[in-house]
Amino acid sequence: MRQFVFLLLCTLALRAQDVSVTASVDSQSVVIGDWIRYTVEVRHPSSVSVAMPVFRDTMGLFDIVRQDTVVRSEQAGQVQLTKQFVIARYEPGSVYVQPFMVSAVGPDGDTVTASSNPIPVEIRGVEVDTSMTIKDVKPPMTVPISAEEIALYTGIVAALGGLAYALYYYIRKRRSAPGAVQEEQRPNIPPHVLALMQLEALEAKRLWQAGEVKAYYSEATEIVRRYFEQRYGIMALEMTTGEVMAQLSSHAIPAEDVSRIQALLSGADMVKFAKYQPVAAENEQVIAEARLIVERTMPRTAAAAEGAAVS
């Protein structure tokens, strides 16, 4: 009888140890800000229940750019759970991706934990070749101008001048004519107010519900980028996501909001350029995140005035 109980306990222990967690990255040496694909695989018997940890914006020392849903497969009584993350770090140095820990409950109700090994990653700064010397700008080349070219350019300038004067005279005459309608002066709308109005209008279009997911993400990030242009004076519409983040780093934006901006713009890039198919919950969160970014980065005087108006 004692031998039977001992064998039974050993069997249960072996089943608990069958829960394994492995993790990997696609690169262990990247430039600061580059994306790292982090993959976790959990294997366990089908009789064991496993709880995966929940991450929001960060995973240890790394920011989470995107995370996929868990993919489950089963074969011969063994279950495999696979989850992928896209992570990034914006400070150079040698760091570790923290162990990925899961909790497992066996058929007897006992709870065990299993975790992966930490993964070392080297985050490199942008390398500058200091051995290269700065060369002077070459002087402009002198090209002789012929008499025919002088006559041609003079004629073009004269024609353009005459056309400009005729247009000016025509417009002035129309405005001074009786019954002429004066152009209405447009009100100067603050950038944050305009952005919030545009986000509300975008939400009313219901683009992603109609299958226009790419257009929905493009318009949402275009509104946010245009707001950055007016708020911070940067050419955000002409920049990549990395360039926008570099420009915003010179402004006093809290780290939490920087991560939120990075996640929104990077997620939209995945949809627009990498053919990523977001789920409904991600689509619903886009407008809310964009609104929060605008509200948390608007001028403090405007935020205080709106708060006073609400109260």
Image (spheres, grey):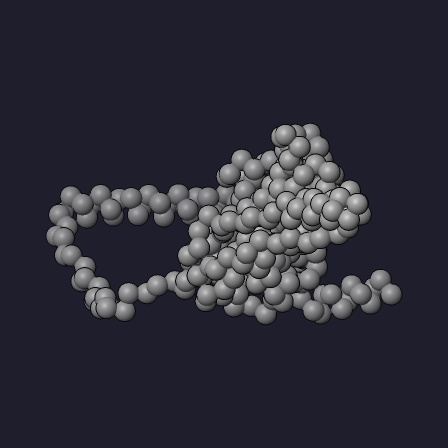
Name the quadrant of the C terminus.
bottom right
Residue drawn at x 54%, y 39% is 272
Residue 148 position (above or below residue 63):
above
Q: Residue at x 27, y 69 (%)?
A: 130
For the point 80% across and 65% down, the residue is: 307
Viewer-closest of 61 and 32: 61
Q: Is residue 39 visible?
A: yes
Residue nearest the viewer, comparing 222 with 62:
62
The answer to whether residue 224 shows anywhere in this view is no
Q: How many marks?
A: 0
- Dividing the picture into quadrants, the one containing residue 29 is bottom left
Name the residue rendered at 68%, 54% in the picture.
113
Residue 157, image x and y in percent? 30, 47
Instruction: Tell me residue 41's x, y (percent).
Output: 58, 44
Image quadrant in which the N terminus is located: top right
Q: Nearer the viewer, residue 80 or 145?
A: 80
Residue 245 place in picture, x, y as percent = 52, 59
The picture quadrant where one finds residue 124 is: bottom left
Q: Nearer the viewer, residue 301 or 41?
A: 41
Residue 223 percent coordinates (x, y)? 61, 48
Where 213 sits versus 133, above or below? above
